[in-house]
Amino acid sequence: MNEIYIEKGGKKLRCGYTTGSCAQAAAKASLLMLLDNILVDSVSILTPKNILYHAEIADVTIEKRNDTGLKRFVSCAVIKDGGDDPDATNGMKIYAKVGIIGESENGNLVIIDGGEGIGRVAKKGLDQPVGNAAINSVPRKMITGELTKVLEDHNISNAIVKVIISAPLGEEIAKKTFNPRLGIVGGISIIGTTGIVEPMSDEALIATIKTQVKMLRARDLKTLVAAPGNYGIKFLYDKYGIIEDDVVMTSNFIYDAVRICVDKGVENLIFAGHLGKLVKVAGGIKNTHSCYGDHRMEILTDISSSFCEGESFNNLKQKLLNCVMTDEAVKHINEAGIGDKVCEKLVMLIKKNIEEWSEYKIKAEVIVFLNDYTILASTANTEKMINELKGKL
């Protein structure tokens, strides 16, 4: 396999190949073995990013017709290599079982389905219709194009080719992915728009947010609930009974999530998160990852300066800037007697920035909680908006 590297954060990281590229390569190898009556130990495919992928082939199985001895199906696998990306599917075997099942009246026809370990779409709003195998449109196009070319190279113009993609460990591995939340049951997805896995890809995370928003909008919900991560999801369930599947997990991409919501026609957004994350949004920080800076204590200090002055403020400022955790900072703010005022301004600033980022196309309500999941502050109409939403979930 040819190796590709990118520079990210001052580090040289090795790229990998998507499950879509693996399925494409395995399907090509299976069809070649079916037509040429030879064993294939490697194939090359061109990914949508125009990068050549040399894939090694494993686990070849030939199923012959009982009466003629001719091959009925050929199956083989490609081992998924995600590079330096922490991918749950890394090391999995992606299989393609290929057979010619008939003649077509209108040129070559490739039928693609999922087998063992490939998830099925159970909710509207995803790349594939409900009931289809979770093999996304780009990998389907990759497989179809690759097999059509092989058929044409063999002067075959009227074959119906059946392709079954499988991943025997898929059902178990899928529990470590977003699939259960996205409405894909029973296995992994065959995905990838470029064919290449870039380590810790921001684009992949943003694509997941888009999928979650699209899925919820498919249920005609104009009010959505969002949280940066598992803390927020647990809080929303414990406090309001809102289940994980009904929450958009934004990770650090707060601004991007807001813009996605605008693009998808969301009108109201309830944002819940721990103080340590959302205080950054109060300061206008669009991506809350620590690599873009911390500034939590500086933002809390700046908000506190509106309600405290002189020596009292200087003392409080020193304490806040020496804090490591935001919950500790809240204690100092409360001891200064300005806790309620600071918290009220905090959530209003978060609300203001979210609405500004949406160009005022979205009305936002905000909940900020602490380590023990107690609510620190929330905007005025939060409870009303949540109650209205719960009636539609």
Image (cartoon, rainbow, N blue to C red):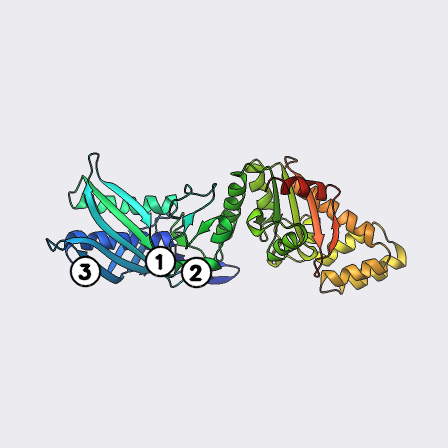
Could you tell me if residue 283 is visible in this image?
A: no
| Residue 364, above or below 202 | above
Secondary structure under tag 3 reads loop
Secondary structure under tag 1 reads loop
| Residue annotated with mark 2 | 173
| Residue 224, above or below 287 | above
Residue 81, quarter of picture: bottom left
Query: Which corner quadrant holds the C terminus?
Result: top right
| Residue annotated with mark 3 | 39
Viewer-side residue, 310 vs 375: 375
Q: Which of the two discs, 1 and 3, labels the residue nearer the N terminus?
A: 3
- Give the Cα separation between the discs numbered 1 and 3: 21 Å
Q: Which of the two discs, 2 and 3, labels the residue nearer the N terminus?
A: 3
Residue type (three-letter) at the residue carrying disc 2: Ile
Q: Who's the residue at 87% across and 56% down the image?
A: 337
- Give the Cα separation between the discs numbered 1 and 2: 10 Å
Q: Which mark is residue 245?
A: none
Q: Is residue 47 left or right of residue 304?
A: left
